Image (cartoon, grey):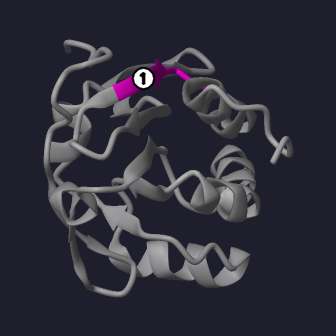
Amino acid sequence: MAKLTRGEKAPDFRLADQNGRQVSLQDYRGRKVLLYFYPKAGTSGCTVQAESIRDAKPELARENVVPIGISPDARESQKKFDRQYHLDFPLLSDREHQAAEAYGVWGEKNIAGKKSMGVIRSSFLIDEEGRIMESWYRVKPDQTVPKAWEGLGIKPGAR
């Protein structure tokens, strides 16, 4: 699967969020988006990742950045994850992994010697016009936010 790089047009999508609302990348034109793909709501790594994004939301908002998470989980699982950790940002259900494939994050994984297909944890910083500013494939859960700051060219807490 091809990886997206700086300057490329970010693939659009239309997926249901945890509340059943249809969300498209196009809906956020005029704002930056921190789009991240995660394997499974409620797992330890995904929780670390989501909580770090939740905690960074005020600083992200000051930079005109909206966080959006995407996983293959059902909408109900996304809703439970949101409620349990008070995430308060869109978590999109990509059951058919169309968005994951478009972003090049659906692929073979090897966990404890067991191979399977799934989401490869990745994140993307997308500009106001829908172009990739930065992409990070196989990002560690605790590195999504620091990588976003790096991509924005700012030091967290510096403002």
Q: Is residue 57 above or below residue 96?
A: below
Q: Residue at x 66, y 33 (%)?
A: 149
Q: Residue at x 85, y 41 (%)?
A: 158
Q: Is residue 13 left or right of residue 38?
A: left
Answer yes or no: is residue 151 visible.
Answer: yes
Give the image location of residue 124, x and y in percent.
Answer: 42, 34
Q: Nearer the viewer, residue 119 or 136?
A: 136
Instruction: Pick the quarter of the image with the N terminus.
Output: top left
In the image, the segment drawn in magenta is 133-140
The rendered magenta stretch, by its main secondary structure, is classed as strand
Q: Is residue 108 above or below residue 118?
A: above
Q: Nearer the viewer, residue 39 or 26?
A: 26
Q: Residue at x 30, y 14 (%)?
A: 5
Q: Bin the neighbour count of mark 1 within 10 Å (Cα to Cα): few under 14, some 14-19, many 20 and up.
A: many
| Amino acid type assigned to the residue bearing label 1 in the image | Ser
Quadrant position of residue 22: bottom left
Q: Which residue is mark 1?
A: 135
Q: Is residue 153 above or below residue 29?
A: above
Q: Nearer the viewer, residue 107 or 33?
A: 33
Give the image location of residue 18, x and y in percent.
Answer: 39, 79
